[in-house]
Image (spheres, rainbow, N blue to C red):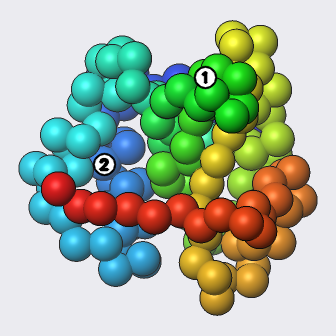
């Protein structure tokens, strides 16, 4: 299996919604299909705030990564947050997520991306190992905080 990445476009919406629904069911994320579609569609239509990538063959993807873009003075410019990453359970533990997390930053660095961030549950040791293999490190002096509006 390959972690080939394809920038998702409007014609990928249904496939992506299926994958996102599976991810959300697994993680306990409560969101209606209408809200999922509303969150994904602008990314697929090219808004500058983020992008979605299919992992694997575009006609039958095995996963996805959603990035959101921002700006960081501390990192010297454009940065991205991995909002979600998902690989179907049947093809996990084959290095696909690691391969994708290594390839994507290299490709985006050529476009000016300076840093990539993600968050992980403190108790999810498997995910922490995966992200560590892909070069992500915990920022010991800072924690990611959120406020829902």
In this rendering, position of residue 21 left or right of residue 56 = left
Position in image of residue 66 (x %, y %): 49, 42
Distance Cα–Cα, label 2 vs label 1: 27 Å
Q: Residue at x 56, y 47 (%)?
A: 82
Mark before the other along the chain sequence, 2 or 1: 2
Crowding near the residue tagged with mark 1, few <14, some 14–19, many ≥20 C-alpha atoms within 10 Å: some
* Secondary structure under the numbered disc 2 in the rendered image: helix
Is the residue 31 above or below the residue 57 in the image?
below
Q: Report the front residue among 146 and 44.
A: 146
Q: How many marks?
A: 2
Q: Residue at x 54, y 26 (%)?
A: 71
Is the residue 77 above or below the residue 58 in the image?
above
Position in image of residue 98 (x %, y %): 80, 53
**Which part of the image, by quadrant, shows the C terminus?**
bottom left
Residue 4 makes an appearance in the image: no
In this rendering, position of residue 13 left or right of residue 90 = left
Q: Report the front residue among 95 and 81.
A: 81
Residue 18 makes an appearance in the image: yes
Position in image of residue 133 (x %, y %): 89, 59
* Secondary structure under the numbered disc 1 in the rendered image: strand
Quick one: which residue is furthest to the bottom in this view?
A: 123
Q: Residue at x 76, y 20 (%)?
A: 109
Q: Which mark is residue 78?
A: 1
Q: Are marks 2 and 1 in contact (CB under 8 Å)?
A: no
Q: Residue at x 29, y 38 (%)?
A: 40
The residue wearing badge 2 is 17
């Amino acid at each position: 299996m390959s972690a080939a990445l394809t920038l998702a476009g409007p014609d990928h919406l249904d496939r992506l919604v299926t994958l996102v629904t599976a991810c959300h069911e697994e993680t306990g994320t409560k969101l209606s299909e209408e809200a999922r579609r509303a969150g994904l569609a602008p990314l697929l239509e090219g808004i500058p705030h983020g992008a979605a990538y299919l992992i694997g063959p575009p006609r039958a993807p095995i996963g996805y990564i959603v990035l959101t873009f921002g700006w960081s003075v501390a990192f010297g410019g454009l940065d991205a947050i991995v909002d979600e990453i998902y690989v179907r359970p049947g093809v996990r533990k084959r290095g696909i997520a690691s391969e994708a997390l290594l390839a994507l930053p290299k490709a985006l660095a050529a476009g000016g991306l300076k840093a990539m961030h993600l968050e992980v549950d403190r108790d999810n040791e498997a995910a922490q190992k995966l992200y560590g293999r892909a070069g992500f490190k915990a920022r010991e002096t800072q924690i990611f905080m959120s406020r829902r509006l």
